[in-house]
Amino acid sequence: MKKALFLGALLAATPLAAQAAGSSTPLRFVLIPKVVHPWFDKLNTGAHAAADMIAKTTGQKIEIEYRAPQTADVSSQNDIIERAIATHPDGLILDLLDEKGNRATMDEAIEQKIPMTVFDSLPPEGMNITAVGADFCEQGTIAAERLATLIGKKGEVAIMMGVPTAPNHTLRAECEKKVFAKYPEIKVVATGIDNDSIETGQKQASAIMQAHPNLAGWVACDASGPVGIGQAIRESGKAGKVQEVGLDNLNDMLQLIKDGVAESTASSRPEMQGYWAVVSAWQSAMGQKTPKYIDTGIDVITKKSL
Amino acid sequence: MSLETTLPGATPTPPKASSLRTLIARMVANPLGGVIGAMILIFGISCLLSPHFLTSFNMIIIARALAFIGLVTIGQAVLMILGELDLSVGAIGGLAGVVGGMLMVQMGLNPWLSLGLCLLMGAGCGLLNGLLITQLRLHSLVLTIGMAGVYGGANLVATRGVAITGVPHEISFLGRGLVFGLPVPFLILLVCLTIVAFVMMRTPVGRYIYAIGSNPQAAKMLGIRVNAIRVGAFALAGFLSALAGILMVARLGTAQPSIGDTWVLSPIAAAVIGGVATTGGLGSPVGAVFGAVIIGIIEDIIVLFGISPYWQSIVSGGIVVLAISLDSLARHYLNRDAS
């Protein structure tokens, strides 16, 4: 399916790609994630892979400028987007912290006729911009359903919220709660807040496990939290007794699965999001129409599939 | 320490010497000389190195970004001159923003009335900080760390971390509008700076603030109402932070719970770069805002030059240290010559 989509994209852009072949001027895309974070580093890797592929296939060189805000704050991100607009790039690839809060800045990009692609988020209402990503709710639902099955659909569970102000983290938590609410014998006894920090996640998870010695399992809402949970489970010697289904595919998370501390993780494929975001941005820069939404799907990674 | 030696503009006359020394002396003798010199230098280098820097679009970006941090910086600078610090200014700004959003959107209150109430609330938060510090004789640094948690927590309790959307369009020009080509928040900053600078330089209250910052015991013996001035300064800082928070809501069109998260350290750094002494009694809000301009330009060129995000803190921190060091070295150079 993905290959077919890419071939379609390639064919659509072929006439312009042919023109681009031999063009010495590289296209310059500015990639702005939500914050400095290893998950976005993986995405950046995927973005560069797409740039390499396009250069090899069409001869069109693409430069990816990665500009990550130091904090996950809308105004900081808007400042970076505005400054990127000032450099007149050929495309902006954005992970919006809040589509409404980012809207005024995106309007400026439209005024300057700079094409945009968003990833891991949705564009503001009424803006005809391609979005690349996975369904956050589906991701949380997959993780929660998997944990429910693991614990026999009964027992005490805890949810590690990510950053309370991050819409995607909040959405995952809501969807996880909905899943647990379906099972009358499952009780959500605690919710921690890790602020997307492994250290905070570890502290919160340790405290919650002490307060709830009968805790049967954990789910999380961001990439760092489940790593902290896994470390807390390991330290307390409860590996195997307390189940964990993680989120995303940071290397630490994968190691926890290898070590048998976490059973699995529902990963949103950051590399693929970066890859398709660049493909879409390239097509937009070539004046081609792009799809409204590219769903990169969710992987369930287990010890077997590693 | 005598009162006279601490007042702005009362710095010693520079020694007459060689042209280089004279230039340095003039810059250092002027309380704003060092920071303005550093700003011009960084501005000039940026113009030379990036074709995108000196464009009207980019200047508007810098001016608008400066406005929010500049307002907080003014309040923090007054407190620092007084020998105090408020680490809850960012949390007050964030709380004011979400309270404004709740009043306008969830309670349907008139936007202008909501803005007024938020400013009062911000001043009230600052007032509370000041009263707790003066009445319980607490250290401002410690107390405001705690109060930052209280105000930040209240923000999360009120919003549950979710942004308040649907802010009325009537107020959006406060954050997004341009008047004579200048962003409205920047013009508001200029008005506030002018008023505060006038109070600091031309009124007894301003002189009292410098006196308290230099020597609170001596100021008390002179009959200055030290505690009242301190409480007032905290209220001012709270008011300006709330103003910045509300303007940010107008800019974003949503009341984000994360507003103000980055307003804690930058205003202190700006004030120090701008010549405000961390020990109190020296500097001016104008210098502090020039310090904020330097930080704003650095943040701008980091993006324009394409510096890796992992190097950004090192680069911006390094330039700040360099600017402060150059100022200190220049003063040392002159003092050595004078002695």
Image: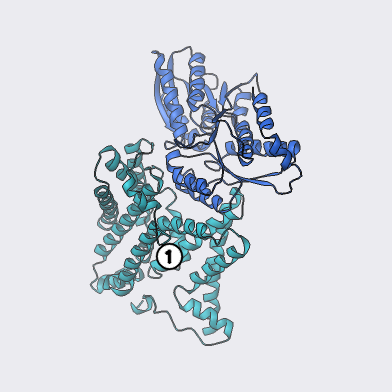
Residue placed most toward the observer, B245 or A302: B245
Q: Percent position (x, y) of residue B317?
A: 55, 57
Q: Secondary structure at mark 1?
A: helix
In the figure, residue A174 lies in which quadrant? top left
Q: Percent position (x, y) of residue A109?
A: 52, 47
- Which color scheme did the rendering employ for the protein? by chain
Residue drawn at x 36%, y 35% is B160
Q: Is residue B326 left or right of residue B128?
A: right
Q: Look at the image and tell me whether residue A271 can be seen.
A: yes
Q: Which residue is mark 1?
A: B288
Chain to which mark 1 belongs? B
Is residue B1 shown above or below B186?
Answer: below
| Residue reaching furthest to the front | A15
Is residue A68 shown above or below B316?
Answer: above
Amino acid residing under circle 1: Ala
Q: Percent position (x, y) of residue B117?
A: 25, 49
Residue placed most toward the observer, B326 or B175: B175
Residue drawn at x 31%, y 67% is B195
In the figure, residue A57 lies in which quadrant? top right
Locate the N terminus of chain A by quadrant.
Answer: top right
| Residue reaching furthest to the bottom | B16
Q: Is residue B47 left or right of residue A164?
A: right
Is residue B84 shown above or below B208?
Answer: above
Q: Is residue A160 left or right of residue B155?
A: right
Chain letter of the blue region: A
Q: Colour of chain B?
A: cyan
Q: Is residue B9 left or right of residue A235?
A: left
Residue placed most toward the observer, A125 or A139: A125
Is residue A297 shown above or below A72?
Answer: above
User: How many residues crowd around disc 1 within 10 Å: few (fewer than 14), some, or many (20 or more)?
Assistant: many
Residue drawn at x 27%, y 61% is B232
